[in-house]
Image (tube, helix red, strand yellow):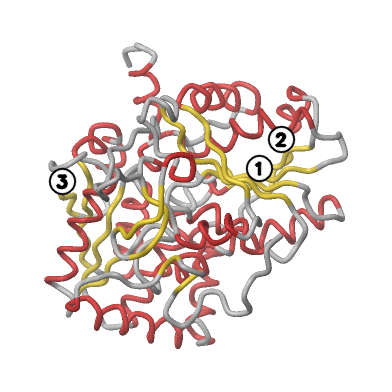
Amino acid sequence: MKKRPDKIPDRKGHFGVYGGRFVPETLMPALIELEDAYRKLRKNKSFIKELKSLHNNYIGRPTALYFAENLTKHLGGAKIYLKREDLCHTGAHKINNAIAQSLLAKKMGKTRVIAETGAGQHGVATATGAALAGLDCDIYMGSEDIRRQSLNVFRMKLLGAKVIEVSIGSKTLKDAINEALRDWTTNVQNTHYVMGTAFGPHPYPVMVRDFQSVIGNEARRQILKAEKKLPDLLIACVGGGSNSIGLFHAFLKDNIKMTGVEAGGLGIRSGKHAARFAGGSLGVFQGCKSYLLQDRDGNVLGTHSVSAGLDYASIGPEHCYLRDTDKINYTYATDKEALSAFELLSKIEGIIPALESAHAIAEVVKAAPSMSKNSIIIVNLSGRGDKDVQEVARIKGIEL
C-alpha cells in the first residue's frame, strides 16, 4: 500500500493531486464564507447538540445494521449485514447531509437554499431540510430524471420546494448541477447551495463526507457489538460518492477491504455507462479536479445508468486519492446486474432497494460466495426503492 501523506486534504482541499477549487472569482467569497462557517460550527457544542438531536428524533438514527440471513444462506458464503440507510426519514442517506447543511445555512443567515438532484432523493431531503429550517428552496432537475422520478418530483413540491426543469444537454444530473452553480453565482448573498454529494469545490467534499460519516461510525459500533470483530469487506455504490465515503471513512485506518461500485450501464465497451475509473481520465469538472468521462479534447461524454443517482460523469476527489493509495478497490455493475439484484433482495429479504443500492447488492452477489462462512460483509443500503418501482416496471414492460 502506498504511504498516505499526514494531512489529507490540505487546507486548500487537495487530496493529493485531486480536489481543490476551480470556480469563477464571483463564487470564491461564498466558498470561503462557507468554509469558515463550517470550521467554526463543526466544533460548536450547541450546533453538534442540535444536529445530534435531529439525528435521533427526526432522521431516525441510529439506523439498523441488519443481518441478512436469507441472502447469506442463498449466496452460501460470507455473513451479510445491511446498513439500513433506507430507513432514514425520506428514505435515503441524503437526509444526513441535507439537514446538516440546511441548519448550517440558517446559522449563516441565508434565507434560501438551492440544490441539484438526479434520483430525487437529495432533492426531497433538501426540501425537507429547508421546510424544517424555514428556508425557501429551489431544486434543479434534468428533464430525463424528472421523467424517471416523477414520484420524488411531487414529494419535493409537496414539501414546498420549486422544481426547476433543466432541458439542456443530457437533461440529467450533470446539467442540473451546472444550472444550480449559475444560480448560486447570481444569488450568493442570500443563498446557500446544498451540494448533495462528496464532490465539487472545497469545502464540499470534506464537509459532505463529515456529515455522512455518521453511517460508518454507527456501523463500526454496531458490528463490534454484534460480532465482536470488524468486518472483512465493506461495499457501497458510488455516484458522486457520499454514501460510500460515509461508510468507508470510519474504517480507513483498519486493514479492511473496501469496494466501491460504479454504474456499468450497458457495458464499458458500449460507451453507455458511468464508470469513471473504468473509462475516465483526470480532468477538471464542476469545481474540482477528479476522474472524469471525457474525450481526447476534454469534452464531457454522455453517461448512462438505469439508476438516476449514479448517472454522473465524475466522482468525488477523495475516492480518486483512496484508489491511488490502494485503500479502496473500485468496480462496476451493469444495468442488468443491478436489476437482478433489485429483484433478488426484494424477494429474499422483503427489502426493495434503491437502484443505486442495487449496484452494491450486485457486487455482494459476486463477492460473498467465494468468502468463508465466518467472514463478514457490510453493504450500505443507501436508499429504498419506492422511487424506482415505476421505472423498473417500465423497463420490464409492465403497466401499473
Under tag 1, what secondary structure? strand
Residue visible at 38% across and 86% down in the picture: 36
**Res 220 visible:** yes
Residue on which disc 1 sits: 82
Q: Which picture quadrant has residue 126?
A: bottom left
The answer to whether 304 is drawn above or below residue 36 in the figure is above
Q: Residues within 10 Å of mark 3 (few under 14, many from 20)?
A: many
Q: Earlier in the sequence, mark 1 or mark 2?
A: 2
Residue on which disc 2 sits: 68
Under tag 3, what secondary structure? strand
CB contact under 8 Å: marks 2 and 3:
no
The answer to whether 375 is drawn above or below residue 176 in the figure is above
Residue extending farthest front:
296
The answer to whether 270 is drawn above or below residue 130 in the figure is above
Identify the amino acid type marked 2. Answer: Ala
Q: Which mark is residue 166?
A: 3
Under tag 2, what secondary structure? loop
